[in-house]
Amino acid sequence: SARQPAEIGFGLQAFARPPGAPRLPRIARGEGVWLIDTEGNRYLDASSGPVASNLGHGHPRILAAMEAQARKAVFAYPSQFESEANLEFAERLGRLAGPGLDRAFIVSGGSEAVESAIKFARQHAVVIGQGSRWKVIGRQPGYHGNTLGALAVSGDEHAHEIFGPMMRAVPRVPAPLSYRLPPNHTVESHARACAAALEEAILREGPETVLAFIMEPVGGLATGALVAPDSYYEAVRQICTRHGIKLIFDEVMSGAGRTGRFLAADHWPSARPDIAVLAKGLSAGYAPLGAALVSAEMVGTVAAAGGFMHGFTYNAHVMGCAVGAAVLREVEEADLAGNSARMGALLRQRLEALAAHNPLLGDVRGLGLLLAVELVADQNSRQMIPLEKVAPSRVQQIALRHGLALYCRRTSRGAYGDWLMLSPPLTITAEEVGILATRLGAVLDDYAN
Ligand code: PMP
């Protein structure tokens, strides 16, 4: 009999899995928004995996670029060789990200990019004589990666309980979740209070000890595609500027065209971050790739002081860069940010129509094709689904039977709510949006019965 994945050694889903966890379909191949298992079942990829496969599966231009690069060189260590792939990728990325974020430290994923962003900000502070600044304020809930540093700045109580003590001195301030508002608050006043909490935390810690504030401009899984009122972004930017603190946007999920602009930051030009972190959609899942984007000025300062004291074997990996360059070429030439805005609006309409006659669906939120729906026990009271009903994993299981691959989350053991990410590849067509919405409706009907 075939050995089970847990016996062989798999990642996340299958490594040290609890007994009785359902079997996962075994992937055979992918075609556009479709994933096909070894038994021939077809699943519409409603989430791009963990919001990564922005160009869908089996994209012929990306495959051609990979093959061409593989025939030339796959790896060359960047302290020994330059590569055309690296130069093209960095040039395209800098141009798309724009002034102030046009230098890239290129790594192999989101967590590494977050670590690199923080270490770069830290070394920069030391170089300019602000070595007392080391604290990084994050948000609760929030997620920035699973390495120890990135996890330390993530607002995930459950993970901190298991892996702590870690950088416990690092404070967190509330993310402006607005579906369940505190008494006597509007969305605007709550967002104002959340921004004010940032300034209070900075003052409490001592501004001279605070290095950075990290947040997702449009939330991913941790906050279920949270978008704050415009005033929140402006307030956060002003507070950081006032206290000499670097504003870091984690755009691991929201970047690379996902929200309808190349960076989610582009929606709020007056709240431009000092550093942005990209991964996932940057390579659309075709290679492990991430980047910390900073200004030429910061790079110049650190370079003049002897260079960045940081690096990985797979920095600026040649194959990764070739994939990144091909992905960015496609994002630009096929106007995938534009398609994301158009298809996102269409999908949102369909989700709102579903919510109108499906009592399980509470909030529908997000921007472009970074959307989420919040599942509730009761639409009127906005009550969460009781923990014992294991909402997200059950929905995910039911969805497979309907040919839909969903990405779901219950945050911090149900402290904030249950949501499903609706974040299909940016290449999705209107017809496929229709199929996705129809199938999701059927999944929710099944769940309710
Ligand atoms: N930041 C955010 C917002 C993410 O969603 C993720 C991954 N889910 C990460 C960082 C970490 O990225 P990676 O898994 O590539 O290390």
Image: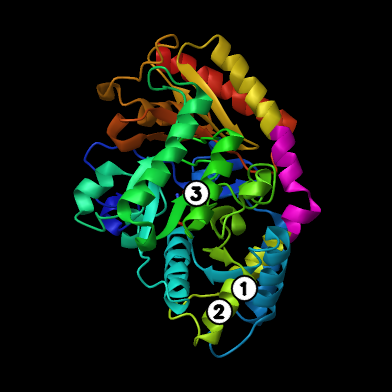
**Residue 26: x %, y % from top left:** 44, 46
Q: Which mark is residue 301?
A: 2
Residue 236 vs 390, above or below: the answer is below
Q: Is residue 333 magenta?
A: yes
Q: Please tell me whether mark 2 or mark 3 is closer to you in this view.
A: 3
Q: Position of residue 369 (x, y in %)?
A: 63, 37
The image shows a total of numbered marks equal to 3
Residue farthest along the right direction in this orientation: 333
Q: CA–CA distance between discs 1 and 2? A: 6 Å
Q: 57 or 231, which is in the foreground?
A: 231
Q: Is residue 192 visible?
A: yes
Q: Residue at x 23, y 58 (%)?
A: 166
| Secondary structure mostly seen in the magenta stretch | helix
Q: Which is nearer the N-term, disc 1 or disc 3?
A: 3
**Mark 1 and mark 2 residues within 8 Å of each other at the beta carbon:** yes
The residue that mark 3 highlights is 239
Residue at 42% x, 31% y: name it. Answer: 396
Task: Say which of 55 and 224 sits in front.
Answer: 224
Q: Is residue 30 above or below residue 406?
A: below
Name the secondary structure under disc 3.
helix
Out of 44 and 305, give the one closest to the viewer. Answer: 305
In the visual, does 156 lie left or right of 426? left
Bin the neighbour count of mark 1 within 10 Å (Cα to Cα): few under 14, some 14-19, many 20 and up. few
Kindly report the distance in space between the C-alpha atoms of the residues bearing marks 1 and 3. 21 Å
- Callout 3 amino acid: Ile
Asked whether 404 or 150 is in front, the reply is: 150
- From the image, tell me which residue sits under label 1: 297
Query: What residue type is disc 2 on?
Result: Thr
| Residue type pointed to by label 1 | Glu
Look at the image and give the residue range highlighted in magenta: 329-343
Secondary structure of the residue carrying tag 2 is helix
